[in-house]
Structures are given as structure tokens and as C-alpha cells.
Amino acid sequence: MNDNNHELTKMAYSLMGNALGSSLAKGVLQMYGGRRGGESILLVEIPFPEHFVADAEGLVRFGKFAMAKAKATGDATWYRAKAFVPNLPMLEGSVGVGPDFGIPMDSVRIYAGMELTLDGFEYSLTKGKGVTP
């Protein structure tokens, strides 16, 4: 037996998922154009729904988002998920066309005044995608 092997229990994943979901509920998902950590522009800010599901496998799921109007024109390249209170960044990740992105989209082109919504948002604690250091 290796004493240095540590694994989180399903209960721990469930508790962490509920903590993350509760923090993001009624927060905002912001999509940006440009480089993360560099020059970028806020394209759209979509409110998170209040309801979410967090399971024992470390998956946090939000359902359909409300409609929001884009603030600027550009190609979405990354996102930031911010907590409702105290408006802290919780997650960051990529936006792109196809399933390999944190937020997969049919097209990344966003136009000012365009109405956008998301069918849902998932985050896996076990894969750790999008977590800011």
C-alpha cells in the first residue's frame, strides 16, 4: 500500500460541487474575445441560472441560461464564470467550435446587440478544466 495515494470520496466531490454550484448560481458567465491574461474585450455577460445539479462524480450542471444581449463584436475565445457574491472569478476556460472546448459553440462570432443564451453549462471537478490557479 502506498501511503502517498490520496483520493477524494464521492461525498467530497458532492460537497465541492454543491459549493461551486451555489457560488455560481445567479452569478455571471462572461465571454471574451482576445487573449486570456492579455488584451481582451468583454463580448457578453450571461446570468447563471439559480438551479444546478452536482453529483458524486464531481460534475456540476446548470440548465438553460436566460437571454442576454452582446455588448461588443468579436470572436469569443475564453470565458470567466463569476460568483454572485462577492462577484469573484471562480472558473476560466476556452470557448470554441467543437466539443474540445470548455464552452463549445456552433460559431464563436458574436455581434453587438445579438441575443445569446446557453442550453447549459457543465464543469467537471475530476477533470479540473477551466480552474484558475
Image (cartoon, rainbow, N blue to C red):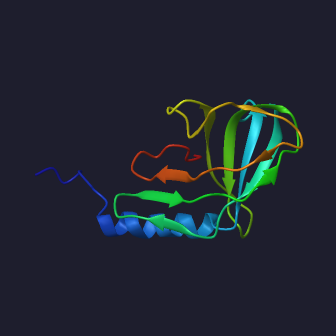
Above or below — where is 131 with respect to 24?
A: above
Image position, residue 9 (x, y; %):
29, 64
Image position, residue 1 (x, y; %):
10, 52
Image position, residue 36 (x, y; %):
71, 34
User: Left of 57 or right of it: where is 132?
Assistant: right
Residue at x 76%, y 39% (from the top left corner): 32
Residue 74 found in image quarter = top right
User: Left of 18 or right of it: where is 6?
Assistant: left
Residue 64 found in image quarter = bottom right
Give whichever of 29, 5 is nearer the camera.
29
Give whichever of 123, 6 is nearer the camera.
123
Above or below — where is 44 with respect to 76?
A: below
Residue at x 50%, y 33% (from the top left corner): 99
User: Left of 85 or right of it: where is 70?
Assistant: right
Residue at x 68%, y 37% (from the top left corner): 78
Residue at x 49%, y 69% (from the top left corner): 18
Image position, residue 26 (x, y; %):
69, 67
